[in-house]
Structure formats: structure tokens, C-alpha cells
Image (cartoon, helix red, strand yellow):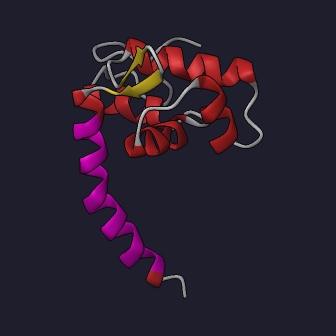
Amino acid sequence: MKIPTPGKPVRGSQSGKPIMALFDLLGRNWSMHIIWYLNENQKSFSELETVCPGISPTTLNTRLKELQATHIIEKVVAGYRLTQMGEELFTLFDPLRHWSNEWAKKFK
């Protein structure tokens, strides 16, 4: 599977729009989970395996490479951490989290 890149077709869209590349990347298994836990602090590969129960080492390695190639995380001596862009992305989740909580109330 190719790494989603702005300007190129991705799963579900041939437009090349950057938002579609981002949605493709974030929609991949474990991507959001990894970002979520790296927001807390940097983590080693084995720590990420622990917080992502059931992830295979191959899948974790693939997601880490994708997130690095797309400038959302970076490899550091102690493991992995969010880049500045990754931190900015995480803060953008706050309004979506609020919206989704309101949306969820419609289903109760």
C-alpha cells in the first residue's frame, strides 16, 4: 500500500486534495491510536506495542514508517515522538472530539 501523499490519488479519492491524503492516512488501522499515545510523550517500539494491544510488529513498523514519511512523527533516540506538525494535528482533534460527543448523543 502506498503512503498517502497530497497531490496524488488515494483510497476513496482521485482528486489529490491534501485533506483526502490526510483522511486516508488517519483512517489506516492503528494510525490514530499511535498518534494518540505519542501525544502523551515519546514511546519506544515496545511501549507502542503495549498500548496497541493486538497490533503485529509488521503493522506497527509499517504505520511508524508511514507517519514518519508524512512528517507527523519522528524517530528519536528513545523511540518515537510527534513532530511539531503532529502536535498541531493533535490539537485540531479537540473540536472534532467535542463535535463527535454531541453527535453521539443523537444515538442515545
Q: Quadrant of the C terminus?
A: bottom right
Q: Residue at x 34, y 25 (%)?
A: 72
Asked whether residue 48 is in view, the answer is: yes
Q: Nearer the viewer, residue 17 or 50?
A: 50
Secondary structure mostly taken by the magenta-highlighted segment of the chain: helix
Query: In the picture provided, is 59 more to the left or to the right than 13?
Result: right
> Does the segment drawn in magenta span residue 90?
yes
- Could you say where residue 61 lies in the image, as x and y percent from the top left? 62, 17
- Could you say where residue 48 lies in the image, as x and y percent from the top left? 60, 34
Q: Quadrant of the N terminus?
A: top right
Magenta residues, start to end: 87-104
Query: In the picture provided, is 44 more to the left or to the right than 85?
Result: right
Q: Residue at x 40, y 36 (%)?
A: 23
* Quarter occupied by residue 44: top right
Q: Nearer the viewer, residue 8 or 87?
A: 87
Q: Residue at x 25, y 61 (%)?
A: 95
- Could you say where residue 6 lies in the image, as x and y percent from the top left? 29, 18
Query: In the picture provided, is 56 more to the left or to the right than 35?
Result: right
Query: In the picture provided, is 97 more to the left or to the right than 11?
Result: left
- Could you say where residue 31 lies in the image, as x and y percent from the top left? 52, 34
Q: Residue at x 41, y 16 (%)?
A: 76
